[in-house]
């Protein structure tokens, strides 16, 4: 043993320290951006922003009610989806296609268009063998910028709904969208891409390179292989926003395990920071905008407790390894499917982060994790992606949980529940329940169907509990807009392409529209000042209660599924009778 | 209703049991049960398992018939426990409604055209009376409908609605003119009443409707909670659907074991669905209304009680709420060298015609002080109290005597060209600062001295206010007193704020201001001039002795006309919400243990390793599932007393209260079923 644990622990501790240090400056900066205040980038971006409004004919002062806001959002997002869909279908005749890759099949094009337009970025294909540079840059990278920006508009509108008193307007969708891209995603992605290039991530439009092998290998069919094709492409520009926008769809099939996407432990560290930074910092933006940063820190604390506890279990499970392999004389942790350059620490931290945010990039094979380790990645997604979840979507889903927690706790202290001065009534309950439970409903229904019919079960490559986990993982990943794959499942079939696509659409748009509706109904309410009888929502009691609510909802919904997947697999592996 | 009836019957008394049992079955009708979706689904489960039972017996396939039968019976029992709880809660209201309805039987009304008791009257059925009609009522008659006395005065026995046997005075004009249909007139000259409510809309009709629960609508808060419960129910339906797929896949891939049967799936669903709270939810609301009613408070809607639980500002009239009804004269303070005797005589002179309690207390004190005056001399011209001048007194042939608030008296003296001695202000301030009311007395243009009228603060009111403060409720005392007196009483009574020299429009403005800042305001009132403020307040409690406009503007009516009731109302409002919240948490916390009971039991045939999760070491799969279902059913009747009485409210800060309730109902809800299911399993195993 090399005493690697201590280095893993140091890496994890340093990582969270750096991450938490970023929250305040980044969150505060985002608050300024969305409140239209002067900020660091105003001198550069403000003229550009004005120009965009002038060209697009947008009156930035004109705000709308929630219905108009939601309509603009849906219209824009569906336009994006159709655009991606068309690019995929026309790939064969479009430029920047040195390898002459053919068009996508219809089900795959549908699945991919939905996937990239919903910030899921589930890939039922491998980028290097299926997608041209044009597709990767123009269609997919574009969606990498737009979908997180759309997620941000929803949470910002919801925050405005909480803050504002007795008005109908919750903001201007186009302005929020533009600012999110111009001031936040674009500059950070640019800097990150340059950094990644400096660390060896490739950025070119060359054709694939051929390398002659020093020692030819024998292929499956007995043929001798002496040449290896090395795919190229504009990876760095794709990579930085893939992570920053919690998108997660890889340029290559191997995603962030590929040395051209994620060459070193340092880039790994930065990539993890990129996908956690915005979702987590939004809690500070929230606190800042509602005028009480403690409220933001409280939510952040609840998120971090769940995330770190899950990471702990995952690390412990991977570190303990597989006893069946130990019996064969191979000691040590479970390194199957993990990159040696990342080790257990860099892999589990990435795996926990990518499933806890809705990023879905992977730097290790989640399918090869121990049952409990893999089970944690599954569990983190099944919590509806709230610790901290995707850009924007994570926080608005978490606020759904907060409102349910406030409602029950409010009753328990004998008051009509209120949160941040707004009464929680029938409409808010409807919307919160929809926000929180839609993805769960989708997972239960679609995985239930998939396991019942042969169109679903025939794709399972590992029968038994592990196969069950694979199906569950696919739908959890799709419905929660995560996009990572457990693999071990042939998902490029019509059945999976369509059901996963449907899950992504439901999981993305139903909660988003519900969040906007809630914003609208909160905005028209009066403000109720706090008193001794008001439930404080920024102290340890409430944080603890919120954690319990999130875990209980997740556990009660998925205990049977987790029991027959990861848990039984663990029991079998450890030789329980 | 006699006062004896008002004593709470014990929860499961025989008298209430019989109708409750009848209601239990009547409410099983799926059409009405649909109002409670969770229980509706349980009933569907009961029907399916019953059919399954028949199938098991006929074919001998599937689960053992005894098992299916037992599950089916238990599901039906679960539903019936729920309908029983609701019927029982309603029953108490119905018992009250019954006695009310008796007073609504055929009354013959004497309809008149003019408000003149000597005019001609035609006899008609009271049910034919319409708004605006006028009727003549004599001693011994029942009042035919709600109305205002427009002529005369009467002693009215209102025991039919208040349970209070002492008759009350009702007279035309002023704030005591309203009478309620169904009450009886004990002593009177003939009075004329103008009817203000059509038949079917009268106070008693409303009461009957409310206590019977017929018009009970779900409150917004109840609806919001129902949304959560329905959402959970849907989730658990899907969980069960999902489990079916999971198990069929697992059986297929493991190549052994049995797919979880429909009966077990339904049993799991019923155990997971929030049946405990759903079963008790209607009862909690009805029982809350009933608890209010047993304190002689009528909430005109469930919404009003819930709003009462949210109130964070109470506007309390000083008189009657904070202080004992009336002020008493306790001291005569002469000034400017006048003798006490001069002052006492002058005070007595000015008070002979003063019928107010304060006036009478001056007479009493003056006589104690040895005044020899017995009555007003002849040719005396009384000067009654007028709102504009705010002084009263009497004009004799030689002198004129006045008494009134010092500032009014000063104006009066100045108008007459007299001078006000400096000493007056000092004495007035001294008395006011002590929380008493000074009343200046004059003879002609001379101020003789000051009467000290003392306010007596009700015993124990300070503690009540500090309790309210702990609950986060701000108390504001409303008084017509000058600011100095008001401040002293406010300090002594321990209220948070006060509004002095308040006029009705000031009250309205105060309420609007508080509401504008987002506060929920409750107030009590009885007079017509309170009506606008009552209509504005979020929770408006009208005294039953109050005028018709006041009663119409209010959403809660206190039949005892006791303003301190507001505090009870707030507590009950909170109790209702807390009971709901606590039982919801308890219900959901229970699910953890039920999963641990049922999941291993349902799936060990596929994966024997799952018996590791059988934490309770339940005997067999069948006994485990039955135990969970039994626990799920019997927890409902166990909690009926809690639902009807409400969880205890302790005034403490929100966070502490939450921790306390989470500990009892959250943690308790996790642990209780582990113990309960284990015990039931032991019993079941033993009896099998």
Image (cartoon, helix red, strand yellow):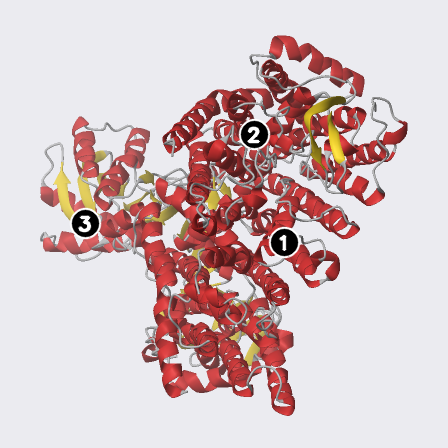
| Mark number, residue A275 | 2
Query: Seen in the image, is B666 located left or right of residue A248?
Result: left
Would residue A254 be visible to someone looking at this image? yes
Q: Chain of mark 3?
A: B
Residue under label 1: A462
Q: Residue A157: where, in percent of width, then height?
A: 61, 33
- Can you say which quadrant of the picture contains the N terminus of chain B? bottom left
The mark lying in front, picked from 1 and 3, is 1
Rendered residue at 39%/77% (across/down): B681
- The secondary structure type at the circle numbered 2 is helix
Query: Do the residues indicated by labels 1 and 3 lie within the same chain of the protein?
Result: no
Q: Chain of mark 1?
A: A
Q: Residue B365: where, in percent of width, then height?
A: 15, 53
Residue under label 3: B329
Q: Compared with residue B40, is residue B396 higher up or lower down, i.e. above or below?
A: above
| Mark number, residue A488 | none
User: CB atoms at circles 1 and 3 under 8 Å apart?
Assistant: no
The mark lying in front, picked from 1 and 2, is 1
User: CB atoms at circles 1 and 2 under 8 Å apart?
Assistant: no
What's the CA distance linking mark 1 and mark 3? 95 Å
Q: Residue furthest top?
A: A43
Foreground of the two, B320 or A390: A390
**The quarter of the displayed image where residue B140 is located:** bottom left
- Can you say which quadrant of the picture contains the C terminus of chain B? bottom left
**The quarter of the displayed image where residue B229 is located:** bottom right
Query: Do the residues indicated by labels 1 and 2 lie within the same chain of the protein?
Result: yes
- The secondary structure type at the circle numbered 3 is strand
Q: Residue B415: where, in percent of width, then height?
A: 33, 30
């Amino acid at each position: 043993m090399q005493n690697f644990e201590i280095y893993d622990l140091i890496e994890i501790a340093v990582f969270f320290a750096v991450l938490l240090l970023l929250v305040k400056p980044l969150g505060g900066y985002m608050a300024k951006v969305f409140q239209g205040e002067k900020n660091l980038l105003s001198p550069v971006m403000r003229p550009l922003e004005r120009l965009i409004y002038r060209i697009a004919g947008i009156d930035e002062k004109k705000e709308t009610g929630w219905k108009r806001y939601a309509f603009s959002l849906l219209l824009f997002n569906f336009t994006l989806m159709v655009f991606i869909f068309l690019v995929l279908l026309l790939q064969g005749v479009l430029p920047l296609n040195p390898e002459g890759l053919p068009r996508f099949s219809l089900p795959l094009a549908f699945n991919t268009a939905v996937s990239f337009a919903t910030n899921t970025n589930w890939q039922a294909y491998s980028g290097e063998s299926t997608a041209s540079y044009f597709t990767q840059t123009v269609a997919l990278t574009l969606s990498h910028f737009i979908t997180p920006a759309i997620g941000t508009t929803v949470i910002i509108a919801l925050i405005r709904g909480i803050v504002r008193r007795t008005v109908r307007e919750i903001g201007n969708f186009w302005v929020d969208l533009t600012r999110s891209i111009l001031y936040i995603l674009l500059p950070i992605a640019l800097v990150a891409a340059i950094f990644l290039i400096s660390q060896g991530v490739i950025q070119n439009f060359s054709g694939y390179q051929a390398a002659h092998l020093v020692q030819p290998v024998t292929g499956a069919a007995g043929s001798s292989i002496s040449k290896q094709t090395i795919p190229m492409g504009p990876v760095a520009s794709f990579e930085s926003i893939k992570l920053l926008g919690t998108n997660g769809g890889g340029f290559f099939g191997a995603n962030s395990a590929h040395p051209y996407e994620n060459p070193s432990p340092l880039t790994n560290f930065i990539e993890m920071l990129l996908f956690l930074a915005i979702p987590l910092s939004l809690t500070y933006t929230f606190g800042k905008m509602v005028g009480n940063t403690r409220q933001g820190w409280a939510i952040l604390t609840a998120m971090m407790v769940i995330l770190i506890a899950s990471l702990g279990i995952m690390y412990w499970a991977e570190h303990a390894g597989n006893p069946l392999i130990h019996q064969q004389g191979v000691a040590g942790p479970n390194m199957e499917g993990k990159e040696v350059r990342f080790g257990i620490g860099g892999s589990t931290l990435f795996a926990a982060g990518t499933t806890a945010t809705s990023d879905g990039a992977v730097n290790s094979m989640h399918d090869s994790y121990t049952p409990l380790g893999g089970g944690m990645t599954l569990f983190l997604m099944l919590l509806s992606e709230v610790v901290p979840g995707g850009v924007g979507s994570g926080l608005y889903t978490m606020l759904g949980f907060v409102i349910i927690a406030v409602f029950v706790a409010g009753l328990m202290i004998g008051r009509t529940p209120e949160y941040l001065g707004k009464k929680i009534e029938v409409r808010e309950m409807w919307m919160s329940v929809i926000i929180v439970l839609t993805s769960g409903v989708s997972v239960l229904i679609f995985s239930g169907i998939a396991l019942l019919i042969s169109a679903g079960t025939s794709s399972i490559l590992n029968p038994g509990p592990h196969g069950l986990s694979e199906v569950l993982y696919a739908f959890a990943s799709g419905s929660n807009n995560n996009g990572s794959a457990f693999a071990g499942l042939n998902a490029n079939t019509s059945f999976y392409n369509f059901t996963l696509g449907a899950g992504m659409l439901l999981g993305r748009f139903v909660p988003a529209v519900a969040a906007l509706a809630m914003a609208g109904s909160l905005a028209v309410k009066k403000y109720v000042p706090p008193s001794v009888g008001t439930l404080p929502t920024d102290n340890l009691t409430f944080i603890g209660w919120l954690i319990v609510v999130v875990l209980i909802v997740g556990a009660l919904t998925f205990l049977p599924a987790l029991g027959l997947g990861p848990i039984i697999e663990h029991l079998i592996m450890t030789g329980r009778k | 209703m006699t006062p004896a009836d008002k004593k709470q019957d014990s929860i499961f008394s025989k008298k209430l049991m019989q109708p409750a049992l009848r209601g239990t079955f009547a409410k099983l009708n799926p059409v009405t049960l649909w109002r409670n979706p969770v229980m509706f689904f349980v009933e569907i489960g009961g029907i399916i398992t019953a059919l399954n039972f028949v199938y098991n017996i006929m074919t001998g396939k599937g689960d053992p018939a005894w098992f299916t039968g037992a599950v089916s019976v238990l599901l039906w029992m679960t539903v019936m426990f729920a309908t029983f709880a609701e019927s029982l809660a309603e029953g108490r209201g119905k018992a009250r409604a019954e006695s009310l309805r008796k007073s609504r039987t055929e009354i013959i009304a004497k309809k008149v055209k003019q408000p003149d008791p000597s005019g001609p009257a035609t006899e008609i059925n009271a049910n034919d009376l319409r708004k605006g009609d006028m009727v003549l009522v004599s001693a011994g008659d029942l009042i035919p409908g709600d109305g205002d006395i427009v002529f005369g005065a009467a002693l009215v026995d209102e025991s039919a609605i208040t349970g209070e046997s002492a008759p009350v005075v009702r007279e035309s004009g002023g704030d005591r003119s309203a009478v309620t249909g169904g009450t009886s007139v004990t002593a009177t000259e003939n009075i004329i009443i103008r009817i203000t409510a059509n038949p079917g809309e009268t106070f008693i009709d409303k009461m009957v409707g409310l206590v019977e629960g017929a018009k009970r609508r779900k409150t917004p808060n109840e609806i919001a909670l129902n949304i959560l419960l329905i959402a959970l129910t849907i989730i658990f339906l899907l969980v069960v659907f999902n489990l079916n797929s999971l198990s069929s896949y697992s059986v297929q891939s493991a190549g052994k074991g049995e797919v979880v049967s429909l009966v077990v799936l339904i049993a799991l669903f019923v155990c997971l669905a929030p049946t405990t709270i759903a079963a008790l939810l209607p009862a909690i609301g009805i029982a809350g209304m009933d608890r209010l009613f047993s304190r002689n408070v009528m909430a005109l809607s469930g919404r009003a009680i819930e709003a009462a639980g949210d109130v964070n500002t109470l506007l309390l009239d000083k008189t009657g709420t904070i202080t004992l009804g009336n002020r008493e004269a306790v001291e005569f303070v002469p000034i400017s060298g006048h003798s006490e005797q001069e002052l006492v005589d002058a005070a007595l002179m000015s008070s002979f015609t003063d019928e107010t309690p304060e006036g009478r207390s001056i007479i009493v004190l003056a006589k104690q002080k040895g005044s020899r005056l017995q009555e007003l001399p002849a040719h005396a011209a009384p000067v009654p109290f007028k709102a504009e001048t705010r002084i009263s007194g009497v004009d004799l042939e030689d002198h004129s005597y006045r008494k009134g608030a010092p500032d009014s008296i000063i104006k009066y003296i100045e108008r007459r060209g007299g001078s006000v001695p400096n000493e007056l202000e000092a004495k007035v301030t001294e008395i006011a600062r002590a929380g008493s009311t000074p009343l200046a007395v004059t003879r002609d243009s001379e101020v003789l001295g000051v009467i000290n009228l003392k306010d007596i603060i009700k015993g124990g009111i300070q503690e009540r206010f500090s309790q309210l403060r702990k609950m986060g409720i701000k108390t504001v005392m409303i008084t017509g007193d000058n600011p100095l007196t008001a401040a002293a009483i406010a300090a002594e009574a321990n209220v948070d704020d006060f509004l002095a020299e308040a006029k009705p429009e000031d009250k309205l403005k105060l309420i609007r201001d508080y509401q504008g800042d987002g506060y929920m305001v409750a107030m009590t009132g009885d007079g017509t001039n309170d009506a606008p403020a009552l209509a504005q307040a979020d929770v408006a409690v009208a005294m039953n002795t109050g005028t018709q406009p006041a009663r119409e503007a209010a959403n809660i009516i206190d039949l005892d006309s006791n303003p301190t009731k507001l505090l009870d109302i707030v507590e009950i409002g909170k109790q209702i919400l807390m009971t709901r919240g606590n039982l919801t948490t308890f219900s959901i916390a229970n699910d953890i243990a039920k999963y641990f009971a049922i999941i291993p039991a349902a799936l060990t045939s596929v994966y024997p390793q799952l018996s590791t999760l059988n934490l309770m070491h339940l005997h067999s799969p069948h006994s485990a599932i039955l135990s969970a279902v039994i626990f799920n059913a019997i927890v409902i009747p166990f909690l009926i007393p809690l639902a009807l009485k409400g969880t205890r409210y302790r005034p403490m800060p929100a966070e502490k209260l939450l921790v306390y309730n989470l500990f009892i109902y959250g943690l308790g809800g996790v642990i209780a079923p582990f113990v309960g299911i284990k015990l039931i399993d032991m019993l079941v195993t033993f009896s099998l």
